Image: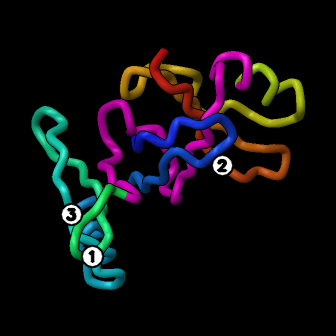
Amino acid sequence: MTDNNKLGRIGWVDLTVGPAVQVRDFYQAVVGFDVLPIDMGGYEDFCLLPPGGGDPVAGVCHARGSNAEIPPVWLVYFTVSDVAAAARTTEDRGGRILIAPRPLSGGQFAVIADPAGAVCALFQPPA
């Protein structure tokens, strides 16, 4: 995650796929991203950085471990103050919880679908 933890903002974007290395290489060639490997304990996921350096702008992750259930879409993470409350509101307002709230980067996240079926993630920064 980036340090952009302001409520209501997009705090991060990532793509979780089976062929993460192939997809990383694809975006590196097409967009020109620099790549920062992230040790996941037995394999690496990847942060994508603007060409020539700078802060990461997105990630490419393997669909394994805690990411096994995440759909293969560019997933935006909207920053919220309370993931559990936002997940309850999702269902109250006709959406679906695809991945229930759970820990991520010292905070919490959930993956939801809105009433039209569009998928996004909700991220609650660390306290």
Q: Disc 3 vs disc 1: which is toward the camera?
A: 1
Mark drawn on residue 51: 1
Residue 46 lies left or right of residue 71; in this view the side is left
* Amino acid bearing label 2: Val
Disc 2 or 3, which lies upstream in sequence?
3
Disc 3 or 1, which lies upstream in sequence?
3
Label 2 belongs to which residue? 119
Spatial separation of the CA atoms under disc 2 and disc 3: 26 Å
Which percent across, then down, holds residue 51?
Answer: 27, 76
Numbered range of the magenta stretch: 57-86
Residue 66 lies left or right of residue 102; in this view the side is left
Magenta span includes 83:
yes
Callout 2: few (<14), some (14-19), or many (20+) C-alpha neighbours within 10 Å? many
> Viewer-proximal residue, 29 or 51?
51
Residue 93 lies left or right of residue 108; in this view the side is right
Label 3 belongs to which residue? 35
What's the residue at 25%, 54% (across, down)? 46
Magenta span includes 34:
no
Disc 1 or 2, which lies upstream in sequence?
1
Spatial separation of the CA atoms under disc 1 and disc 2: 28 Å
